[in-house]
Amino acid sequence: MEKNSASSRSGTRQTQFDAVELEILWKRLISVVDEAAAAFVRTCFSTLVRDGNDFAIVLTDAQGRSLAQSAMSLPGFIGCLPATVRHFLAKYPPETIKPGDVFITNDPWKGSGHVHDVTTVTPIFLEGKLVAFGAVVSHLPDIGGKLRSNSSREIYEEGLQIPLMKLLDDGKPNEVLIDMITQNIRVPEQGMGDIWAQVAACRMMADRLRAPLEKVDLAALGAEVRRRSEQAMREAIRALPDGVYTSTVQHDGFEEPIIIRCKLTVDGDRIDIDYTGTSPQLPRALNVVPIYTFAYTVYGLKALLCPDIPNNEGSFLPITTSAPPGSLLNPTYPAASGGRSAIGHLLPGAVFKALANVLPEKVWASGSPNSSMTMSGEYRGKRYAVVNFLNAGQGATAHRPGFSALSFPANLGNTPVEIMESLAPIRVLRREIRRGSGGKGRQPGGCGISFEFELLPDAPDATASFLMTQLKSPTEGLAGGGSGQPGRLLINGNAVDPTEPRVLRAGDRVLMETAGGGAYGAPE
């Protein structure tokens, strides 16, 4: 393809690119977003970002189509953020947006699936023209309401809801909104600190983009990247035999197990995934809104079919997802969704299982989503609210054992012990690999984690919530491989149901054991 070689002399911006130029410019965009992510991590207040990696930063074009994301971004957030930008554009048309504006929301249906994630979107202008958006989402340490748990029966219990609105209007802070947030969350200095860090990261992104955009037309560059990515994904899909492939995944329920039914239809260069037959929505916090259903379904397909192409809008275009209204994967408002990751993180596994006979050398056996522990209380005159992550065992493939103590499909980090002890009145007794918890097979499943701690002797009562997965339904193996061991939760030696928050008292001991992953192939 012939490039516009006279771009710098004529004052116009380059609109055509050869393969070498495209690669250089693409890497430059990624480096800009990575630099913004590094700034966010350095300036944020909570450990959820610094140690847990529970965030994403994405650059979109002026229409809200994704161009690049930071290397450390969570896969589900990558799929959600561009849609959030488009929701803002629907409410605030481009001609009304000003350089000093910053938008904010935590609407689960228009953000990233639950109220605990707050998204900010910053418009990026060049010579007075709107050319792009920087979008950041991160999990705040607290959003008010009950502690995050599966016991919430509707969204009103889960905390403060922030509709699509402006945090900054022409550079002027929305003081009423800021007062509302600080009044309603338990650790306002951490929560608002993280929000302002999001804004700072996007402003840095805008600054770093000015130099490349002086010579390059971002719309043309984005169109070329999307075109190539879409073409690569469609070629990968065409390599699959046309047909309908199905799978069923079972998960811990309440009165009865949760069922996810996946019907994957390959038709030429398209894939359509239908979740008809999945359990109905629940009066519990495990519901998964469509934006999150799409994000993790598409991620599973991309990881399986085309892992090396850029993550952008083009690679998602050949794929659609659907679920019946009122189902677990398409709930109606005001459904609770605080624990939606427990179900949403199973969707790549459902896709893998559906395609196991077609791509036996590529798929993974089932693994367990990560678990978490949330604590709130007051210690030595200071209010605290912390969220700590614990990863689990992942499934094996035909070529290797499953990974131990890993988070998949999210790339969340295991919160360091020192951080846990510095932010809450606990003493960690042990955190170790749960040996033997992976499934038995030709390639064994990965092992989970055993994590035990106690509340300090001088600590007042604390409220604790445990989001744990696969305590009843073990992870499945593939091709004759064995299932992993289920997880469990013990308080003072007694097995307890993690659904309801608990009050911990001084000296109480808690043991969390995460599930092991499934094995691949029958034992030799």
Image (cartoon, grey):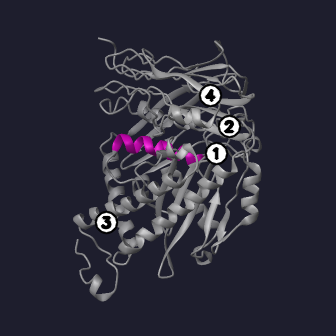
**CA distance for labels 4 and 2:** 19 Å
Tag 3 near tag 2, CB within 8 Å: no
Any mark on residue 6, and which?
none
Q: Is residue 226 visible?
A: no
Tag 4 near tag 2, CB within 8 Å: no
Q: Nearer the viewer, mark 1 or mark 4?
A: 4
Q: Quadrant of the C terminus?
A: top left
**CA distance for labels 3 and 1:** 35 Å
- Numbered range of the magenta stretch: 290-305
Looking at numbered disc 2 in the image, what kind of residue is underneath it?
Answer: Arg
Q: Quadrant of residue 35?
A: bottom left
Q: Which residue is depicted at the point 67% across and 21% down?
A: 497
Element class at badge 1: loop
Rendered location of residue 344, percent (x, y): 55, 38
Tag 3 near tag 1, CB within 8 Å: no
**CA distance for labels 1 and 4:** 28 Å
**CA distance for labels 2 and 1:** 10 Å
Residue at image mark 3: 25
Element class at badge 3: helix
Looking at numbered disc 3 in the image, what kind of residue is underneath it?
Answer: Leu
